[in-house]
Amino acid sequence: ITCDFRHLLNPNPTTPTQTTIMKYVGAIDQGTSSTRFMIFNESGDIVAVNQKEHKQYYPQPGWVEHDPMEIWSCTCDVISACLKSSPISASDLSAVGITNQRETTLVWNAETGEPYYNAIVWNDTRTAPIAKSMEGKYGPDRFRAKTGLPLASYFSATKLSWLIDNVKGLKEDLKSGKAKFGTIDSWLMYNLTGGVNGGIHITSVCNASRTLLMNLGTLEWDDEILKALDIPKECLPKIVSNSEVYANGAKGGYLDGVPLAGILGDQQAAMFGQTCYAAGEVKSTYGTGNFVLMNTGKSQCPSTNGLLTTIGYKLGDEEVVYALEGAVAYCGSVIQWLRDNLKIIQDAPQSQTFAEKVDDNGGMYFVPAFAGLFAPRWRADARGCFVGMTAYNTRDHVCRAALEAAAYQCKEGVDA
């Protein structure tokens, strides 16, 4: 999350330092598995942090959902806990920014503030048939020239189409403006600024670039794509830059009067936070998934190797910076799967303990294609599998193969 501290620092270095008032910024990190709030001082030191996991819902094979109300509740809880555990109050915060899981999609009623359905998570695969039907005679790259993205269940447009087809009355409410579509940044910003009492409906340009509905050249919703997919423009949020003051926190809320001044999708936030400011600089981060992003400067860089052309960031009125991305759906979440589903480890560090007990993987490899394979293969029909398993293999080999899968998938993205 970006913030320019220069105006907060003492403008006169000869003035005694004891007259300088320390300033702080806060960051909401709403991820696939948990929500976190962090407070930093003007030196970038962490003053306070609080984190809370939310439930993952798997109603059918390949389906992944989150409860939007639980996400909002977790956000309130971590902000409150963070402020209570630190010596500062909300009024000491110069600004708060948001970073979020990107393609996860939800719709809510603007009159009641209630979601129509659970949020459909970015790694949900139920919309693979919808993505296939959208291809028509053009194939999976039908909208790639405009959006930088292939038609895939990964992106928000297919998820919104599923909601329109399966939630009674939603299409009419979307057309009338009664229902609002958004990614998680839109949902949080709406609630932080008042919800039904004047909450704003916006999304950042980098999150909009993950919907399959925004034109990378104009940075606006593309009318031709909306018409082709029969998605009403009335339901879409306003597209804004990644760094500007959008509004203040709602009166009476945990961030009452605090400027809300930054929104970056989680992977773009990581790229910016790791100072990839120059074309050619690359970051690779490992969370729920693994994402390799390369700054390509002021120019779009179409990929012929299965990578995504996307927005890197846009600071206020400055020119937009583009990026190339290799996206892997399951990385760190594989360890969570070992813990929660297979129950062969008690906590994440134990996976390393067991993996280090063997010299190698014993000839066993793991392909964690729980949501198909993303970049560079884009195979929605792929499924997870262990390969090369024999009676020789043990729990230790399973853990090692799971950890090695992250490295192999990352290498494939870097090579592409």
Image (spheres, rainbow, N blue to C red):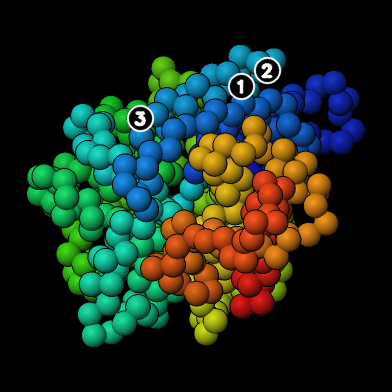
Q: Nearer the viewer, residue 202 or 81?
A: 81
Residue hosting label 3? 69
Visible residue check, residue 47: yes
Look at the numbered discs 1 and 2 and tell me whether their residues touch, using CB distance below 8 Å: yes
Name which residue type carries label 3.
Met
Does residue 220 appear anywhere in the picture?
no
Distance of mark 1 from mark 3, alpha carbons? 20 Å
Image coords of residue 175 (percent x, y): 13, 52
- The kind of secondary structure element at disc 2 is loop
Camera-side mark, 2 or 3: 3
Q: Quadrant of residue 231?
A: bottom left
Q: Residues within 10 Å of mark 1 (few under 14, many from 20)?
A: many
What residue is rendered at 61% in x and 78% in y? 416
Q: Earlier in the sequence, mark 2 or mark 3?
A: 3
**In the image, 11: left or right of 348?**
right
The residue where tag 2 is placed is 86
Res. 82 mark: 1
Question: Which callout, 1 or 3, points at the residue further toward the start of the chain?
Answer: 3
Pointer 2 and pointer 3: residues touching (CB < 8 Å)? no
